Amino acid sequence: MQLSVLSSGSSGNATYVESDECGLLVDAGFSRKRVQRLLAKVGRSLDDVGAVLLTHGHGDHASGIRSLVRECGVRVYAAPGIWDRPEAVTVEAGETFEVCGFAATFFGVPHDTPTCGLRLSDGVREVVLATDLGEVTPEVLDWMRGAEALVLEANHDPAWLRRGPYSADLKRRILSASGHLSNRQATEAACALAPHGLKDLVLAHLSETNNSPMRACGTVKQALRETGYDGIRVRAALRRHPTPWVEVGRPLETPEYAYRYAGGGGQLFEVE
């Protein structure tokens, strides 16, 4: 199993995940033509997409759904309240279903509109995606535990948000338990999941105003390093640029050190 976050942010979100059998999109917050261009950047096309799994009904996740259904005949899957339209296959949150070679399960997350995270398994590896949520509750953490790859929101740095240009009402909404995850909250989730097999973490839905890839990745990497899990690969998803392929389950590349006595110069050890 492998994935690429094609683009992520308030201007649009889409992730391509594939198994040996088929590929699927998680969300489609762009026009059909834009999705096609993004897929081309990772060597894929809409012909490789067997379904769209929709986590969220806002335009930055769903604006391309109608054109994909109308022009490509792609089947859409969503939990109740997210895309209640004739073209969608409705699946209850918590119910596992088979699609494109995956066992897929939607699970509810706290947000200001009906929103789900998604857990995918190919029978061997598991990946979880959750890109719009105000907090990682114990229930949400349970759904994430054991996944080897995680696409998780890291929307803002709280200090940057408080000092930034947004209105007071918008700041309160973003910071609320039904708003968006901060770097600190994403870090806490990563540290809780690290002992349970996490190998790849993609930080998604970064605010262009209140965050940066360097800030988000640096915050998470430092905490993982301090807790002894610096082997976990952390990267940020960007707008308009797909991430490199994430091969789910690829072993961690923990450095191996060989110590030997150094000859002369007053240095006791060298590291190979």
Image (cartoon, helix red, strand yellow):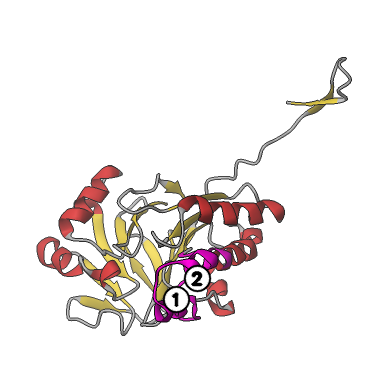
Q: Which residue is mark 1?
A: 171
Residue drawn at x 28%, y 73% as measured from the top left: 77
Q: Element type at marker 2? A: helix
Q: Position of residue 149 (x, y in %)?
A: 50, 56
- The correct choice, above or below, for 95 with respect to 65 in the image is below
Q: Position of residue 129 (x, y in %)?
A: 44, 64
**What is the three-letter code of the residue carrying label 2?**
Arg
Residue drawn at x 19%, y 81% as measured from the top left: 85
* Left or right of 4 on screen, residue 159: right
Distance (Cα) linking label 2 and label 1: 7 Å
- The correct choice, above or below, for 139 with respect to 68 in the image is below
Q: Which residue is mark 2?
A: 162
Residue drawn at x 40%, y 46% as measured from the top left: 245
Q: Which mark is residue 189?
A: none
* Left or right of 259 on screen, residue 53: left
Q: What is the span of residues highlighted in magenta in the rendered image?
A: 155-184
* Left or right of 158 on screen, residue 48: left
